[in-house]
């Protein structure tokens, strides 16, 4: 999508400026490449678009592109690294996130010296209030080098101009990430169990109670535990995520759902879990 034809359409924009003069290129649902001024492109439903460019497959690299099934959308989202998969998991659990997409847009601008620059953020997230997040998922704070830092200034200004945000997402602490990975294994609605089990869990964990003890009080742990973990993913049940999950972990029904929750937010996008808030979660 680089080249002279696209370059002629890009207006001059200085890095670190006010975000004006930036354009956005994307692939429509019909497979057509389009390019619009950034201020106009924000009306596009990026969460519904395919990647504007594929993730590279690097020989001898331990990690290659993969797919994350999103409880938010009921669809798969491609990822290109372990760090990106972790951030998809964190955003997927955030109840304020309503849409997710990988690399759906390329931003283009001119440096003060006239050279055309471009950057493809790794992730797009749509929030319930309609605003958007463009994000990259570095494995460390220095990943991407100077080019990533220059692009960061431009993208931060561009997003601020339209009421969105751009961020280089920090990985959650290892224990939190491990707990979320475990709970994510139960994110699919099939794990919520039969009708009535949700109410029984809310009653069993009305006050903080060890996980195994509360599950056993409801019924056969082999049947009940998947529903407990699903409820912890959704946020119907809560527990601190900065300590390893185990059978004595104290679990409680969420305060906003009738119980007195004890889970604390774990950082951007990774706090309280996602509930089945619409029909798209109950297939």
Image: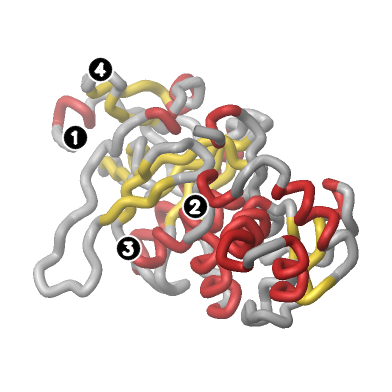
Front disc: 3 or 2 = 3
Q: Is residue 245 above or below residue 82?
A: below
Residue positioned 56% across, 66% down in the render: 222
Provide the residue designation for mark 1.
1
Please, what secondary structure does the residue beneath circle 1 have? loop
Task: Find the distance from the CA under tag 4 to the CA under tag 1.
Answer: 17 Å
> Which SS class for mark 2?
helix
Mark 4 or 1: in front is: 4
Circle 4 residue? 30
- Tell me the quarter of the picture where residue 250 sits: bottom right
Q: Earlier in the sequence, mark 4 or mark 3?
A: 4
Q: Which residue occupies the foreground of this view, 174 or 27?
A: 174
Which residue is pictured at 66% across the width and 44% down the height? Answer: 275
Frontmost residue, 194 versus 277: 194
The earlier-in-sequence mark between 3 and 2 is 3
Q: Quadrant of the N terminus?
A: top left
Does residue 163 appear in this view? yes
155, above or below 141, in the image: above
Q: Which residue is mark 2?
A: 153
The reply to whether residue 18 is in sight is no
Q: Which residue is mark 3?
A: 81
Q: Nearer the viewer, residue 142 or 89?
A: 89
Sequence-wise first label, 1 or 3: 1
Q: Is residue 17 left or right of residue 199?
A: left
């Amino acid at each position: 999508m680089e080249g002279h034809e696209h370059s002629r359409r890009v207006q001059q924009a200085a890095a670190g400026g006010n975000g004006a003069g930036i354009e956005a290129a994307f692939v429509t649902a019909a497979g057509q490449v389009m390019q619009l001024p950034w201020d106009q492109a924000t009306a596009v439903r990026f969460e519904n678009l395919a990647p504007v460019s594929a993730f590279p497959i690097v020989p001898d690299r331990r990690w290659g592109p993969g797919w994350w099934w999103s409880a938010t959308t009921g669809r798969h989202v491609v990822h290109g690294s372990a760090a990106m998969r972790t951030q998809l998991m964190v955003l997927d659990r955030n109840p304020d996130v309503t849409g997710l997409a990988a690399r759906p847009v390329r931003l283009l601008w001119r440096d003060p010296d006239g050279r055309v620059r471009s950057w493809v953020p790794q992730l797009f997230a749509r929030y319930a209030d309609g605003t958007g997040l463009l994000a990259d998922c570095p494995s460390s704070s220095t990943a991407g080098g100077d080019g990533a830092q220059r692009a960061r200034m431009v993208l931060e200004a561009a997003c601020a101009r339209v009421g969105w945000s751009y961020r280089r997402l920090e990985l959650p602490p290892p224990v939190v990430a491990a707990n979320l990975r475990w709970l994510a294994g139960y994110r699919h609605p099939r794990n919520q169990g039969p009708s009535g089990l949700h109410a029984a869990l809310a009653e069993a964990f009305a006050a903080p109670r060890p996980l195994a003890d509360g599950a056993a009080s409801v019924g056969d742990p082999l049947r009940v535990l998947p529903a407990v973990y699903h409820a912890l993913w959704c946020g119907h049940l809560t527990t601190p995520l900065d300590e390893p999950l185990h059978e004595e972990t104290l679990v409680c029904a969420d305060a906003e759902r009738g119980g007195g929750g004890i889970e604390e937010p774990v950082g951007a996008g990774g706090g309280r879990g996602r509930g089945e808030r619409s029909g798209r979660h109950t297939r």
